[in-house]
Image (cartoon, rainbow, N blue to C red):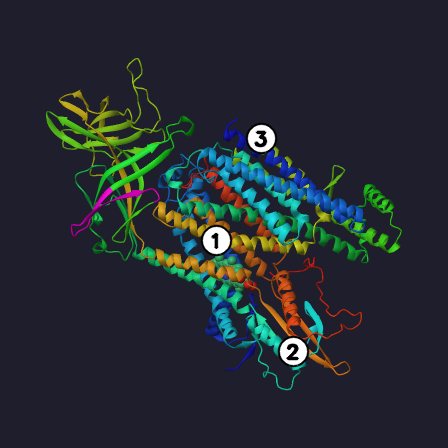
Amino acid sequence: MTLAELSKLLFSPVTLLLYTTSMLAYLYAMAFTKVDRSADEAALAGNRARILGSALAVAGVAAHVAHILTRSIASGRWPRGNMFEFSSIMALTVVLGGLVILQWRMRRAEVMGFVLLGALITLGLSLLVYAEPAPLAPILDSWWRAIHVSAISLAAGIFTMGFVFNALHLLRDTAERRVAARTEAFGGSTVGAAFAGTPTDEDHDQLVDTVAERANPDPDALHDALHDDAYRLALRDALADRWLGVRFPWRIALGSIVVVTLFSLTFQRTSATLAMPLITLAIVGLAWWAVPYLPSASTLDSLAYRTIVFAFPIWTFAVITGAIWAEQSWGRYWGWDPKETSAFLTWVAYAGYLHARATRGMRGRGASWFGIVAFCVLMFTYFVVNLLITGLHSYAGL
Amino acid sequence: MTRIDSADPPEANPPVRRRRSRPGPLGFVLESVRMAWRWLTRMRTALYLLGVLGVETLVATVVPQEPNVPRTVTAWRAGTEGPGETVSAFIDMIGAYDAYGSPVFLATLLLLFTSLTACLLPRTRAWWRIARSSRPPRTNHLGKQEQVARFETTAEPEEALATGRALLGRRRWRLRSPDADPGAEPQVAAEKGHVLREGGSLLFHLSFYVLLIGVVLGQLLGFSGQVGIIEGDEHSWTETQVAYWSSAPGRWWSGDDHRRFEVTLDRFDVDWHRDPAFGGQPSLFLSHVTVTHPDGSSREDTVGGNDPLVVDGMKIHQLDWGYAPRVVIEEDGQVVHDGFLTLSATEEGVWHGAAKAPAADPDIGLDLFLVPYAPTDEAGRPQITGAPWDDAPLLLFRQYVGDLRLEAAQGVNTLDLAGLVEMGNGALRPGRSVDLGEGVTVSFPELRRWVGFQVSRRPTVPLLLAGAVLVLLGLVPALYASRRRLWMTATADPSTGRTTVTVAGRAFQRPQAFAAEYEDLVRALRRELPAPADPPGPSPASENRTSDPRPPREQVVRR
Ligand code: HEM
């Protein structure tokens, strides 16, 4: 086996599998610790799952780093040459950022499942632009470029985390608001709200089941649990619409699928255009299932803000070093080349998010929409500009 | 100096209302101007303007820009590429082919900067006042703050407060003077981070002016020009206005600003990865040049892809290169053309150019293609390949005669075929010549290369760099510094002879970070004050609302 083959193997399947199983373990941990906080046994199971998830994520990071190292040795240069390498580093940033900042520093392991999901999507996209390791064109071989590209991929990775939180915030916030609105109509009872929408028999059965299964004799605890479970069901119910006899967040799914399908055209591959909507559907389903277990909307909002605030100066720095590199190699610091333009656009979009956060009346949902749009701009900068619009930055390596 | 209690920064979105004003048209105009100004100072307006700027930039990303890719724009206008002529006409109408030079873009920038000014003036004034002469406010709601801790000490109340003051002072908190409120119950009030955070934000926004000045002055004072120089050419190139192929002098750049140094290209090294897997990617471009100053001193140096050469404050970049065949045309034994042609690359991997001989009668024009690597196969025929290295060059040409119409503008590498008739064609290896009949011979004595250099002077680059550094220096405290306040009281309990100390705090941003800082402060304070010998009773000595080491779950973080 050559080094290049080993490197490929380390990436797919090893890294991908480790990240996927880690994500599943984290998601399991999130649901389990939340459902039965009172029962020690269940909390312990959740805790074990979280530890397993962390271990798998760390192993995944190790395999990922090994992949990058072997690949650099095989091509005799640092992995900054093409889009595949860039996306791979971006995903690594997402996982590492999640482990170090979220789990270790902020003790917010419960959202790690979704952070890994974000990393996996990034890696999936990177496979769409896969290229064999190749030497770098001499014009790309500069220190400023190395700094510029590192900073860009770091910031893009952290922005990806921010997007995950923005999206979850909007989802959770919508659910919370709808439940609150219904609760008011039903005299302040969340139990009432659970059935306020369009109560279905499954909902009812499930609720009764959960209550019956609870072997806790303490009536107060029972009441609390009932209350909690009812609230969770209500949250999930609030997002669902009935269509073809199936309750599912159809409208959210439709919106996401339209956007993703448009985006998938960038890759000009039928397989991508067919698969991406289906994956989106699955992700919406997953997020819907997870809504009750997520941290509260305001926590998600503050996580999103803190992540984006962390990435924004890095992106600013990256744009500045890009200009320095352009001055060095093309003799002009800024030429409104499509890539430069869209990096600037991304910067403006995130500055818009920060302003929205500081503007009364836009804080919260409004700001999160800004964050979503800003991330779409980032994806546009990265994929659409590289693949469809040609400029001087023709390093996509395709 | 009168001291004021420090307060929040000015309202970011002040209401815009029409006040009753002086009657008459003048009053109306004045009032409208005042309203427009108020509207511009709103942050929400800035947000809209940023949105408009974003949309314009997006358009400019999708639509090809004339200053960058003129050829694509020509193709879009002609309808041979892009969305067709109708859409193209619309794009032209809104000026989107040159979005950054369009009036709409300039107007947006103007509005944005006006808004910035309108927004920053009151903010800067308020910041200055706060930084110079504000004092932390007292609180009447000690128990209602985010963080509250109580503990007992045997120290006297005044002593406890003095210790607290000293501790906070050492940690660089801004303190309210103890003499500020005669007659009131003694209270320590302290504040930190407000000057830094708002100051950082102001620095960040103000540095946009530095960038703006840098860009505008750079446009006016700068110069950039392009020229191609042939490898080993015995005539050196002199840096003067007329010597450039094309140039873009700023409005305040004068002909006297040219440096008049001379450049010769001694050698140009170029190489490729010849492994077919990498498709002939280039691995090396390096120009070896000799620069001679007007005073006669000269030096040898190199210009590389990422390694420009600075001569007398002008930067020489190597941007482009191409093959330069020497083509000699003779008519009846007379040389009518002898020179190196600067061929340009085409997408197919062949190089294209034209030789023009107006001295011949009638004019002779050659439309040329150079295939750098065309090895001869067994049958003796040249194999055309797309490889870029010149190991087996072959020059193909078509001969035209007639009128070259050189009086009309035309590219150096294209012929104007309107007045020409095609005569025949030929192929040449280096060192060969071919007889085209009617006394005309064409020869191809040697193949060299030419390099396209950009020579530029951008005097404001250091200023721009300083502006960029200021942007970052301002951004970091603007985003990460947090404004926080702390209060402390001490009351004596005559029955026990002890003093109860209450420390309360609140953070306007980053409550989690503040919780840790606060805990540390309280701990340090307790260490410095003498603790009572026996901790009294079962009631907890310290009551900290966030006893959980984890940050409180449902905390709403302001920004
Ligand atoms: C030129 C484009 C602009 C950009 C890129 C920009 C960017 C930013 C950024 C990144 C922040 C976050 C820093 C912080 O939280 O303190 C910020 C804050 C702020 N910006 Fe801007 N800004 C621009 C123009 C403006 C204008 C025109 C105004 C006024 C109308 C304005 C008013 C503010 C205010 C008041 C804050 C502070 C928010 C707060 O801390 O509460 N900005 N700006």
User: Could you tell me which residue is drawn at 47 percent across and 35 percent down?
Assistant: A73
Chain designation of label 2 = B
Q: Name the residue under label 2.
A: B160
> Is the stretch drawn in magenta largely helix, strand or loop?
strand
Horizontal side, residue B330 vs residue A159: left or right: left
Q: Label 1's element?
A: helix
Chain designation of label 1 = A
Mark 2, other Cα within 10 Å: few <14 / some 14–19 / many ≥20: many
Range of magenta residues: B289-306
Looking at the picture, which amino acid does disc 1 mark? Answer: Thr
Q: Is residue B18 above or below residue B245?
A: below
Q: Is residue B304 magenta?
A: yes
Of labels 3 and 2, the one closer to you: 2
Of labels 1 and 3, the one closer to you: 1
User: Could you tell me which residue is drawn at 28 percent across and 56 percent down?
Assistant: B251
Q: Does the magenta stretch include residue A251?
A: no
Q: Which mark is residue A316?
A: 1
Q: Name the residue under label 3.
A: A271
Q: Is residue A194 above or below residue B118?
A: above
Looking at the picture, which amino acid does disc 3 mark? Answer: Ser
Q: How far apart are marks 1 and 3 (CA)?
A: 36 Å
User: Could you tell me which residue is drawn at 35 percent across and 57 percent down?
Assistant: B462
Q: Residue B106: where, in percent of width, then height?
A: 41, 56
Looking at the picture, which amino acid does disc 2 mark? Answer: Ala
